[in-house]
Image (cartoon, helix red, strand yellow):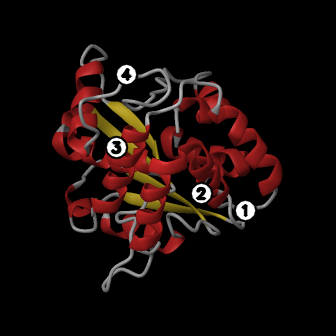
Amino acid sequence: MHSGFWGPVASRLARHHRVHAVDLPGHGESPALPSFTLDDVVEALDTTFEAVGAPLTLVGWSLGGLVAMRWALVRPERVRRLVLVSTSPRFVAGDDWPHAMEAETLDRFGDELRVAWRLTVQRFLALQLHGAESSRALLAEMRQRLSSRNAPSTATLVEALTVLRQCDFRHEAARIGQPALVVSGDRDTLAFPAAGRFLAERLPDARFALIPGAAHVPFLSHADAFNAAIDEFIDG
């Protein structure tokens, strides 16, 4: 995904804050990196924002939440606080982690991306909205937003899935000292709400906001509830 998905939220926040809407490397208008690893992405972002000076409030959605947590760990002076939206400390299930999708499901997406990436991405959009209220209208909106900017390469998409497949912040989260807000939809089948609650409990200074009726895109499907949660955290 690219930063255009944040449209209404970014515009609203920009009324009172300086907002940088970021396309991750290889997505939207940002050029690709030689490799898409979590550390490579964080280094690219950190270099880009050196000129900003003031510590940042990072708002990361899904994969973006992993990027935000890693950035907060390696450059804590750069990060003032975190808003982690539909983010899990670990996106794949394991013997000691039931709050995620099975690894085989994510692996199948990677295999299918290599064969028919457009159809696979469309199916991934549908999965993000599975069980959400008003999902049909929202799916049409997300498809339109997806096509509004350059499409990522298949290689970038596969590497991004690998990041989701390999990352595990369950223990590292305890070392992230910045204030954090963790936002989950109670119908999310990609970043389970139990995973969001676990993350909020593991982070030293965090609060948890559960949005009823929302799936993986609460800032679009339930904008009022999402905006209220983020306003209270940033301005409260």
- The answer to whether 135 is drawn above or below residue 20 in the figure is below
Residue 42 horizontal/vertical position (percent): 26, 36
As drawn, the label of residue 36 is none
Q: Measure how far apart labels 3 and 4 are at the Cα level.
A: 19 Å
Q: Which amino acid type is marked by label 2? A: His
Residue 110 horizontal/vertical position (percent): 42, 56
User: Which residue is denoted by mark 1 in the rendering?
Assistant: 132
Check disc 2 and report its element: helix, strand or loop. loop
Q: Quadrant location of residue 35?
A: top left
> In the rendered structure, are the residues bearing label 3 and label 4 in contact, judged by CB atoms less than 8 Å apart?
no
Give the mark, 1 or 3, whose residue is nearer the N terminus. Answer: 3
Report crowding for label 1: few under 14, some 14 to 19, many 20 or more residues within 10 A (C-alpha). Answer: many
Tell whether 136 sits left or right of 12: right
As drawn, the label of residue 68 is 3
User: Which residue is denoted by mark 4 in the rendering?
Assistant: 31
Who is closer to the viewer here, 207 or 90? 90
Residue at the farthest bottom position? 95
Give the mark, 2 or 3, whose residue is nearer the N terminus. Answer: 3
Q: Which amino acid type is marked by label 3? A: Ala
Q: Which amino acid type is marked by label 1? A: Ala
> In the rendered structure, are the residues bearing label 1 and label 2 in contact, judged by CB atoms less than 8 Å apart?
yes
Residue at the farthest left position? 74
Tell whether 41 sits left or right of 198: left
Which of the two marks, 4 or 2, is nearer to us in this view? 4
Check disc 4 and report its element: helix, strand or loop. loop
